[in-house]
Image (cartoon, grey):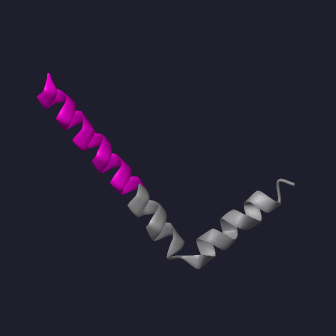
Amino acid sequence: MSMRRSVRQGLVGAVVAVALGLVFAAYLQPGLIVDLGNRLWSCF
């Protein structure tokens, strides 16, 4: 049972690391952040 738990925790950790890496990569493109900000601002 503990091996399943550790495998699951490892997979969750890997998914979180990939998600954080994608967010960090998105911030390296300033045009994308400006576009997202403009889209958010146009909602108000």
Q: Going by the picture, which residue comes out furthest to the front?
A: 2
Quarter where residue 2 is shown: top left
Q: Going by the picture, which residue comes out furthest to the top?
A: 1
Image quadrant holding the C terminus, namely bottom right
| 39 relative to 12 in the view: left or right | right
| 16 relative to 44 in the view: left or right | left
Is residue 40 covered in magenta?
Answer: no
Against 35, residue 8 (above or below) is above
Q: Could you tell me residue 23's position as x and y percent? A: 48, 62
What residue is rendered at 26% in x and 38% in y?
Answer: 9
The magenta span reads 1-19
**In this orientation, which residue lies closer to the viewer: 35 or 1?**
1
**In this orientation, which residue lies closer to the viewer: 14 or 40?**
14
What residue is rendered at 53% in x and 71% in y?
Answer: 27
Against 2, residue 15 (above or below) is below
Q: Could you tell me residue 20's position as x and y percent? A: 42, 58
| 23 relative to 7 in the view: left or right | right
What residue is rendered at 59% in x and 78% in y?
Answer: 30
Against 7, residue 34 (above or below) is below
| 19 relative to 4 in the view: left or right | right
Q: Going by the picture, which residue comes out furthest to the right?
A: 44
Q: Of helix, strand and loop, which mostly describes the magenta segment?
A: helix
Q: Could you tell me residue 33's position as x and y percent? A: 62, 70
What residue is rendered at 83% in x and 59% in y?
Answer: 42
Quarter where residue 3 is shown: top left
Q: Could you tell me residue 7's position as x and y percent? A: 18, 36
Is residue 14 covered in magenta?
Answer: yes
Image quadrant holding the N terminus, namely top left
